[in-house]
Image: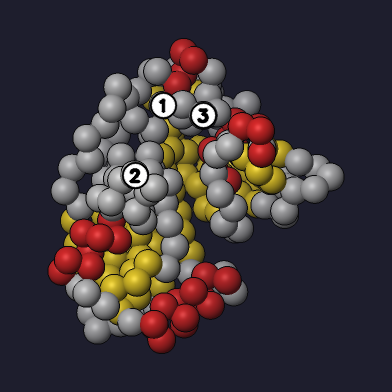
C-alpha cells in the first residue's frame, strides 16, 4: 500500500529556525525521481530555510530547518555536539517492560541498501535509550531517545532487541511489517535553542 502524505504543519517559525511536523510518506529532501519533499514545501514559504537533520520518508514528526547558512552551521554543530535532544514514540512488536539502553554499532548493509545492520567489527558506535510506555494488545508503545544519529538507528536497534517497529517493511518480519499501512515511528519531541517542541503521533 502506498501512503499518500498529508500536508505538513508549521509548528514554529522565527528569524532563526523553522520546525515542522512532517507527515509519513514525505521525503525530507528531494529524491532522485521525486522532487516533492519537506524541504521544497518549507522553502516555498521560507526561501532561506535549510534543512538541519532528516527523518526517514516513512517516519513522521518534528523536523528542524535553519533560516540561512549561518544558522544552519550553528544548529548542525549543536546536533554534532549533542546539544539538541530528540525523542520518538514507536509501537513495537511483542511485550516490553521497563527501560534500557541499546548499545550496538551500526554499518551499511551494502548488498542490501538502504538497509543498515549491526556490525560489531566495523560499525559506528550507536546508542538508543528506550522506555516502555504501555501495552497495546500484542504490541508495546515505547519512547525512544537516540544518543547518536545513525541512519535507520531506531529501526535497526529495536529489531536487534527482538521488538521490531510495527509497519517496518525493511526490518520487521512480514506479519508485523504488514500489520500497519505505515511505519509506527514518530519524532515526538525536539529540544533546541531554548525551545521545547512537542508533536503527538496519530497512532
Q: In which quarter of the image is residue 182?
A: top left
Query: Which residue bears the numbered disc 2?
Result: 33
- Pair 1/3: label in front: 3
Which badge, 3 or 2, comes first in the chain's sequence? 2
Q: Residue at x 35, y 23 (%)?
A: 180
The answer to whether one can see residue 177 in this image is yes
Q: Which residue is drawn at 35% across and 59% down?
A: 63
Query: Which residue bears the numbered disc 1?
Result: 167
Label 2 element class: loop
| Marker disc for residue 94 | none
User: Where 195 sits versus 107, above or below?
Assistant: below
Q: How far apart are marks 1 and 3 (CA)?
A: 9 Å
Which badge, 2 or 1, comes first in the chain's sequence? 2
Q: Where is residue 139 in the image (x, y as percent from the top left)?
A: 45, 23
Q: How far apart are marks 3 and 2 (CA)?
A: 21 Å
Q: Where is residue 28 in the image (x, y as percent from the top left)?
A: 35, 54
Q: How crowded is mark 1: few (under 14 residues within 10 Å), some or many (20 or more)?
A: many
Side of 110 where 83 appears, left or right: left
The answer to whether one can see residue 60 in this image is no
Q: Where is residue 37 in the image (x, y as percent from the top left)?
A: 28, 52
Q: Residue at x 39, y 82 (%)?
A: 69
Marks 2 & 1, CB-CB < 8 Å contact: no
Visual colour scheme: secondary structure
Q: Which residue is drawn at 25% across and 50% down?
A: 36
Marks 3 & 2, CB-CB < 8 Å contact: no
Query: Which residue bears the numbered disc 3?
Result: 170
Label 3 element class: loop
Amino acid at each position: 500500500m502506498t501512503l499518500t502524505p498529508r500536508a505538513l504543519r508549521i509548528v514554529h517559525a522565527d528569524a532563526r529556525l523553522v520546525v515542522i511536523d512532517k507527515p509519513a510518506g514525505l521525503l525530507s529532501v528531494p529524491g532522485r525521481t521525486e522532487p516533492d519533499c519537506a524541504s521544497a514545501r518549507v522553502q516555498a514559504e521560507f526561501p532561506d530555510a535549510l534543512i538541519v537533520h532528516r527523518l526517514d520518508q516513512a517516519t513522521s514528526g518534528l523536523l528542524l530547518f535553519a533560516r540561512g547558512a549561518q544558522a544552519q552551521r550553528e544548529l548542525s554543530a549543536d546536533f554534532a555536539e549533542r546539544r539538541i535532544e530528540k525523542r520518538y514514540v514507536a509501537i513495537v512488536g511483542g511485550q516490553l517492560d521497563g527501560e534500557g539502553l541499546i548499545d550496538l554499532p551500526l554499518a551499511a548493509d551494502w548488498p542490501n541498501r538502504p538497509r543498515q545492520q549491526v556490525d560489531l567489527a566495523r560499525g559506528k558506535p550507536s546508542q538508543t535509550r528506550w522506555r516502555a510506555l504501555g501495552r497495546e494488545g500484542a504490541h508495546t508503545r515505547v519512547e525512544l531517545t537516540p544518543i547518536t544519529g545513525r541512519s535507520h538507528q531506531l529501526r535497526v536497534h529495536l529489531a536487534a532487541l527482538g521488538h521490531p517497529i510495527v509497519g517496518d517493511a525493511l526490518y520487521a518480519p512480514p506479519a508485523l511489517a504488514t500489520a500497519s499501512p505505515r511505519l509506527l515511528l514518530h519524532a515526538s519531541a525536539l529540544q533546541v535553542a531554548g525551545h521545547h517542541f512537542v508533536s503527538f503521533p496519530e497512532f
